[in-house]
Image (cartoon, helix red, strand yellow):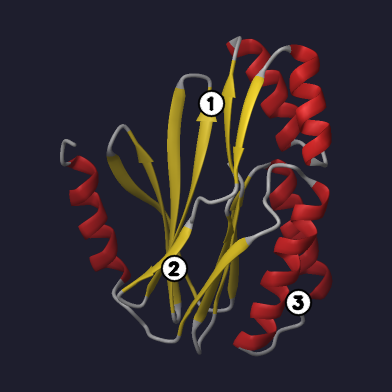
Amino acid sequence: MTLVIAFIGNQGAVMAGDMREIGFGGDDSLIEDLERELYDGSITSDNELAERADAIGVTIRVRDDKAKVSQRDGVLVGEVTETEGATISRKRLYAAKGSYAIAEIVDSRLRVVQRGGASNFVVLGNEITKKVANECIRGMWEGGTIQDALRLVMLTMQIAASVTASVSRTFVLVHTDTAADIPGAIANDAQKEQKPD
């Protein structure tokens, strides 16, 4: 699980997501230990991650090509995956001009867990990425235009990548200035989730 951050404004919305995906192999308890260190900020660089994994006998596969954010019919969509033991769940953020919703997907069931309106930053990520993002927002956001929010989102992505190996240095940025149909996008996704592959 890495970092997706969005700003929802009255004039539009922006969203960014990093592109890192890490696959782990080996003993489950050792993988959990490594993930905990990675997500709490103990491991800050790719070298540290490789060295620590090697030291405890966990294999890792790092890819920086997974697009976690996209735009569909004016709705910005970002998704992160959370693993807790054997349970894998996904959190999906939908944003458009003036509103957003967060859905959780567990066992092919999509359920909306939060809704909100304009003038909000929303952050999905692990412990360290959320901490970094919240510090950036609290420390630097004094209100402003969608362009100001865009600059802050980009800066936050860069800072997060410099303090944790769980985030790639590259990220995808999407923007919309329409008050698109979030409930429609959610209903559409809920149907897709329930269809067998």
- Secondary structure under tag 2 reads strand
Numbered mark located on residue 84 in the image: 1
Numbered mark located on residue 28 in the image: none
Residue 181, picture quadrant:
bottom left
Residue 4, image x, y percentages: 57, 57
CA distance for labels 2 and 1: 26 Å
Residue 76 as seen in the image, left or right of residue 109 = right
What residue is pinned by disc 3? 141
Tell me if residue 178 comes above or below residue 184 in the rendering: below
CA distance for labels 3 and 1: 33 Å
Q: Nearer the viewer, mark 2 or mark 1?
A: 1
In-front residue for pair 145/68: 68
- Name the quadrant of the C terminus: top left
Name the residue located 64 percent from the left edge and 79 percent from the top edge: 150
- Secondary structure under tag 3 reads loop
Amino acid tagged 1: Glu
Amino acid tagged 2: Tyr
Residue 63, picture quadrant:
top right
